[in-house]
Image (tube, rainbow, N blue to C red):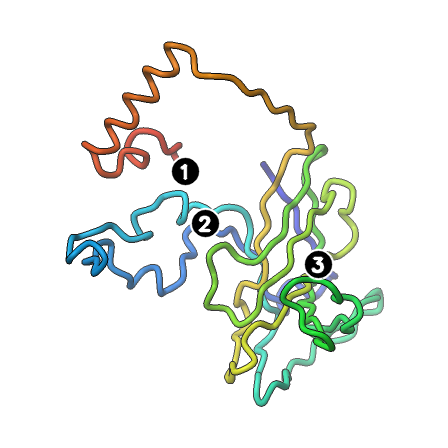
Amino acid sequence: MKIRLSCLPGYETLVPKPRLAAGTLPDWVKTMPAKTESAVLAGAEVRTVKQCPPFLDAMQAGILFPLAADLTVENGELSWDWDLPAHPQGRTSRSPIGVHVPEQGRGVPGVEDGQFLVKFNSFWTLELPEGWWMLFSHPANRGELPFRTLTGLVDADQWRDGLVHFPAIWTDPQFSGTLAAGTPVAQGWPVPREALELEFGPMDEAALTRHTQVQDALQDEPGLYRKSYRAKRS
């Protein structure tokens, strides 16, 4: 699938580009052990999520959308030193972030009364092939980030000339420091816009045999899913 991303002429060297999530695991995943001892299991060795392909594949699927500029956070105040030049055809803010007033998030779990929502601004349009949505959400499994991006679904095959921004709840009021430009603030996954149909029923004899074989093999062969069932990634 080819996805086209466009920015205003002249901005292509000034604003960070979204990037494929493949191969962009954070440092904490790279440094965590693949196995560790479990106190609950009396010191028995267990595999960590570093050996869980679905956990890692979710983090490496789709597109990561970056923070446009360094963001300094001190005493609950957010500031930046970034002067993106005005563009004669520009119609939106040149700030890397904006806000949603508290009333816009009222009733959303996790939004405290009177709390502003952060809006991470994007400078790239996005065009998907006909019949595809883009699901935007918080970067998968990135709980260390001091915010939580809200989830949205956009008809990206139709909304190809407008920008998509990313509202988020600031979840760590004690955070102090700098979020670097390029920090992922949202992740997007293409989703086919098709009606879903659910079908239920008991396993037939052949399916039950396959199911039993898989369950038995899981006990005998660590990493079975990764070795035998995980599709090859490009």
Residue drawn at the location 70% of the way across and 62% of the way down: 108
Label 3 or label 1, whichever comes before in sequence order: 3
To which residue does mark 1 refer?
233
Q: Residue 227 appears at what percent x and percent y?
A: 28, 33
Residue drawn at the location 78% of the way across and 54% of the way down: 162
Q: Residues within 10 Å of mark 1 (few under 14, many from 20)?
A: few
Q: Secondary structure at mark 2?
A: loop
Q: Residues within 10 Å of mark 3 (few under 14, many from 20)?
A: some
Residue drawn at the location 67% of the way across and 69% of the way down: 111
The circle drawn on residue 117 is: none
Q: Secondary structure at mark 3?
A: loop
Type of amino acid at the residue the image marks with label 2: Gln
In this rendering, the label closer to the viewer, 3 or 1: 1
Q: Residue furthest bottom?
A: 75
Label 1 or label 2, whichever comes before in sequence order: 2
Q: CA distance from mark 1 to mark 2?
A: 10 Å
Q: Residue furthest top?
A: 205
The circle drawn on residue 7 is: 3
The circle drawn on residue 60 is: 2
Type of amino acid at the residue the image marks with label 1: Arg
Q: CA distance from mark 3 to mark 1?
A: 29 Å
